[in-house]
Amino acid sequence: MFVTGHGPFPTYLKRFNIRNSDSCGCGNLGNPLHYAISCLFTTSYHLTKPSADLEPLWWKRVMNNNNSRAKIRKLIHFIAENETLIFPKDGENN
């Protein structure tokens, strides 16, 4: 779910017209990688940022690591539970 971008992420929800904006409340693109490595709202759940050329390998290693998977599960739960904090109100940050 996380790797494919499915879930409680603005980029996914906008694709299906559930939200008007694909932005995070911090103003950046609200995709899974953003929440996992750089979002100000999710710093407790951050993973090490991959270099652009090694991102596919990074995803594979993250998914094969039990600690990283546990952190991602907690991150997804946090996002789902704090949707009003993390997502901008529709009409903002379009």
Image: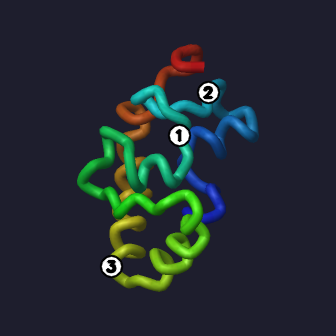
The front one of 38 and 51 is: 51
Residue 82 appears in which quarter of the rendering? Answer: top left
User: What amino acid is labelled 1 in the image?
Assistant: Gly
Say few, some or many: other residues with alpha carbon within 10 Å of mark 1 (under 14 / 14 to 19 / 20 or more): many
User: What amino acid is labelled 3 in the image?
Assistant: Asn
Residue picked out by circle 3: 67
The answer to whether the residue labelled 1 contacts the one labelled 3, judged by CB atoms less than 8 Å apart, is no
Q: Is residue 33 above or below residue 27?
A: below
- Mark earlier in primary sequence (2, 3): 2
The front one of 16 and 2 is: 2
Specify the quadrant that holds the C terminus.
Answer: top right
Residue 74 point in image, percent of width and height = 35, 63
What's the mark number on residue 21?
A: 2
Q: Is residue 84 above or below residue 94?
A: below
What's the mark number on residue 30?
A: 1
Picture residue at 56% right of the left edge, 75% below the top: 57
Picture residue at 54% right of the left edge, 31% below the top: 23
Mark 1–mark 2 distance (CA, rounded to whole Å): 9 Å
